[in-house]
Image: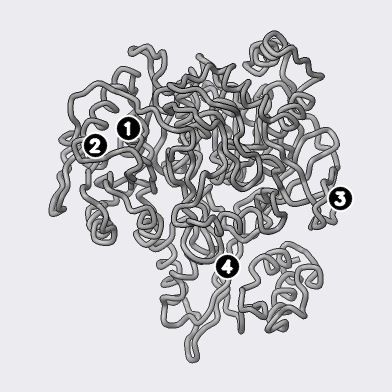
Amino acid sequence: MNDVTTDTGGRLLWEPTAEAIERTTMTAYVRWLQKERGLRFDGYHDLWQWSVDDIEAFWASIWDFFEVKAERLYKRVLGRREMPGAEWFPGARLSYAEHIFRDRDDAAVAMIHESEARDRGEVTWGELREQVAGIAAGLRELGVEPGDRVVGYLPNIPETIAIFLACASIGATWSCCSPDFGIRSVVDRFAQIEPKVLFAADGYRYGGKDFDRHQAIAQLQAELPTLKHTVVVPYLDPDATTGDLERASMLPEMQRKGELTFAQLPFAHPLWVLYSSGTTGLPKAIVHGQGGVLLEHLKVLGLQADLQADDRFFWFTTTGWMMWNFLVGGLLTDATILLYDGNPATPSLDRLWDFASDTGMTCFGTSAAYISACMKSEVRPAEGRDLSRLRSVGSTGSPLSPDGFRWVYEHVGKDTWLFSTSGGTDVVSAFVGGVPTLPVYEGELQGRALGAAIEAWDEDGRSVVGEVGELVLTEPLPSMPVFFWGDPDGERYRESYFSLFPGIWRHGDWIEITSRGTAIISGRSDSTINRGGIRMGTAEIYSAVLALDEIRDALVVDIPQEGEESWLPLFVVLEDGAELDDDLVKAIRKRVREDCSPRHVPSEVIAIDAVPRTLSGKALEVPVKRILMGTAPEKAASRDSLANPEALDWFAELAKSRG
């Protein structure tokens, strides 16, 4: 793919006014750099170049500009610079949660929330502080100490944020899955980190249907032997009880009176564990540090997203997507964050736009898939509702098509700042995307984030402009994983990011850096499947599918389609005598839905004679994906390296038939 030249130059859609540029925190930061550091820059791209050329000076400036508070200051910005293994701010001791609550007015609104199961409500800073203090005191009584793992099987509601902040305040490490995840997927994630306490909702509502989770909680208890206690969060039923669950209490019961205190922790102390997936084995348990997340989110939400005191910041997400963690990071700014839990299409796709109007939302964050669905359903957000406060629309999860860009400006507002972004669970942030002082061009991300040394590299490791290449980072970021859980020698970490270009982070996306410094993301260059922002490895899907007696082998790929949801075909090799009839297709989809997630149910199930494999037995997921996206078979894979090259021919014919 990296031999394609595509620097076509998108149409200019929007430019910030001089007044808008003047009020940005980015402008205030540039002036601060001039006053405090004696630095001057010729526009944003010049500023970006400095930020990646002198990363120690840049990240020190972020620390100082945002007035990071630490019980013990750092000795230097970087103890070690090489990747993997960069050591950030050695010696510093601080608290992520303390920065969330710093200088807050107890009467001010921290969160506005709404869901299919609950009417709209508000949580003030005083109420949040009291709840976090009570949960933290309850956790200490349960014996939770710094470094212990606490997990949640919870929806996107205020209680989930309070529980996380309670964990962060005492130095416990948090991890969460959405309650619509199948039990096997949850166990595959949580069992790796050996949690001490589980918080789980009694149920959830989605698409107008209620789903009780008591049986699922009991299964989790049975399969997580390290659990000492389970706390049930009453959500679906305000009068819910623990039922037959053992060693369990209800959330209101477990809370204790106490003052909110903040453990001062090393910069790299584990804050949370997120999960990304490789193509083999268990999902990768990615550990991020308290300080790295703090600095990255102060930068990306304060400067790139420009969240300020009058903002109301929303991103439609579940707790199983890193955008939930990103949304929580909004509490580090002076903005109010907005939560919505449920199906965004119930009763119609207008639901979230009504929520935007009703709450005075200023930033509407969503996925490219949601914008595509609104386009296809001919939703008209600006008609019949007041979106006058809506200043910006953010899009992520997959590349936003040029049609999607145009739709936002035609039907949301011509004065809207649209920032399409790209980043990942791996860095729990966006490293290409929004820049409030730059124009928006159709189909293009505005620029590379400060401090993110992003380049497009060809297969020989050369940086290219105006061509599609591998997205790489040539310098470390503070929010890169501290380590993977259960990877003591770092082998899996190195294999995930540094196997293609030693010492250089290869992210797994195709990117083009245009001649004007914007970026175009054209999908994954690896086989990770990202559906609705939930990333899942192919191994998890194979585990579910191959449990069926009728299936001998399988291959799944995710094919992007411009302007609509990606095509997710599952190719299966049947056992002798088996037939791919409607009943088997239903059984396959049911297993994927229950064991993995509803988002990863295949678009189609197609029978094939054989899965193409290398001589060492590895399935050719990426070559098949590239062939189905139009790459010539001889460029996608070397036939000499294949155990069964004829199996690849079938996919070449399928690609021809699909046009």
Sequence-wise first label, 2 or 3 = 3
| Residue carrying label 3 | 5
Is any part of residue 239 visible from this angle? yes
Q: Is residue 623 above or below residue 260?
A: below
**Lateral position of residue 571 relative to residue 245, left or right:** right
**Badge 3 or badge 4: first in the primary sequence:** 3
Label 4 crowd (10 A; few <14 / some 14-19 / many >=20): many
Disc 3 versus disc 4: distance between alpha carbons? Answer: 28 Å
For the residue marked with disc 2, what is the amino acid? Answer: Leu
Quadrant including the C terminus: bottom right
Q: Earlier in the sequence, mark 2 or mark 1?
A: 2
| Residue at image mark 2 | 139
CA gap between label 3 and label 1 equals 51 Å
Mark 4–mark 2 Cα distance, whole angstroms, equals 42 Å
Earlier sequence position, callout 4 versus callout 2: 2
Label 3 neighbour load within 10 Å: few <14, some 14-19, many 20+: few
Q: Which mark is residue 170?
A: 1
Quadrant hosting residue 253: top left
Q: Give the distance between the C-alpha atoms of the residues marked 1 and 4, in whole angstroms.
A: 42 Å
**Mark 2 burial class by Cα count in 10 Å: few <14, some 14-19, many 20+:** many
Tell me what residue is drawn at x 70 percent, y 58 percent.
500
Q: Is residue 382 visible?
A: no
For mark 2, give the secondary structure.
helix
Q: Are marks 2 and 3 in contact (CB under 8 Å)?
A: no
102 lies above or below 256: above
> Quick one: 157 or 92, which is closer to the camera?
92
Q: Nearer the viewer, residue 606 or 209?
A: 606
Pointer 4: what residue? 556
Is there CB contact under 8 Å for labels 4 and 2?
no
